[in-house]
Image (cartoon, rainbow, N blue to C red):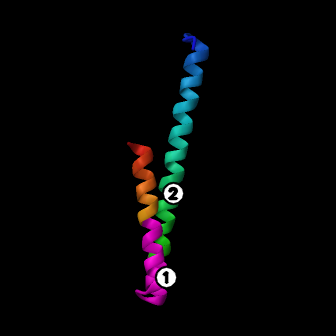
Amino acid sequence: MKKTHGRKAARTLHRLHRLHRLHRLHRLHRLHRAQLHMIRVCAEKGTGLPAARAAQDITALRADLATTTS
């Protein structure tokens, strides 16, 4: 593959970095919403199956965020 230099390559690299940041922010937003959902579920229904499902969702989102960050 031919290496590119100059303004076009810099613009492409900038777009890729921006896209990566947006994906990371989206994942953080999903994690935050899941955490708020778990708080709401525990407040309304106490600990039980819905709270356990919410905790599983949070664990999965944290793992997804960790894999994309590293």
Give the mark nearest the N terminus, 2 or 1: 2
2 vs 45, left or right, is right
**Residue behind mark 2:** 29
Crowd class of label 1 (few under 14; some 14 to 19; many from 20; radius 10 Å): some
Residue stretch in magenta: 39-58
Residue occupying image coordinates x 43% and y 79%: 52
x and y percentages locating residue 5 in the rendered image: 55, 10
Q: Nearer the viewer, residue 40 or 23?
A: 23
Find the residue positioned furthest to the right.
8
- For the C terminus, the quadrant is top left
Please name the amino acid that badge 2 sits on.
His
Give the x, y percent position of residue 34. 49, 67
Q: Is residue 5 magenta?
A: no
Q: Which quarter of the rendering shows the N terminus?
A: top right
Residue 43: image quadrant is: bottom left
* Disc 1 element: helix
Amino acid under disc 1: Pro
Mark identifier at residue 3: none
How far apart marks 2 and 1 lie (CA) works out to 21 Å
Q: What secondary structure characterizes most of the magenta part?
A: helix
Give residue 56's quadrant in the image. Answer: bottom left
Residue 50: which numbered mark, if any? 1
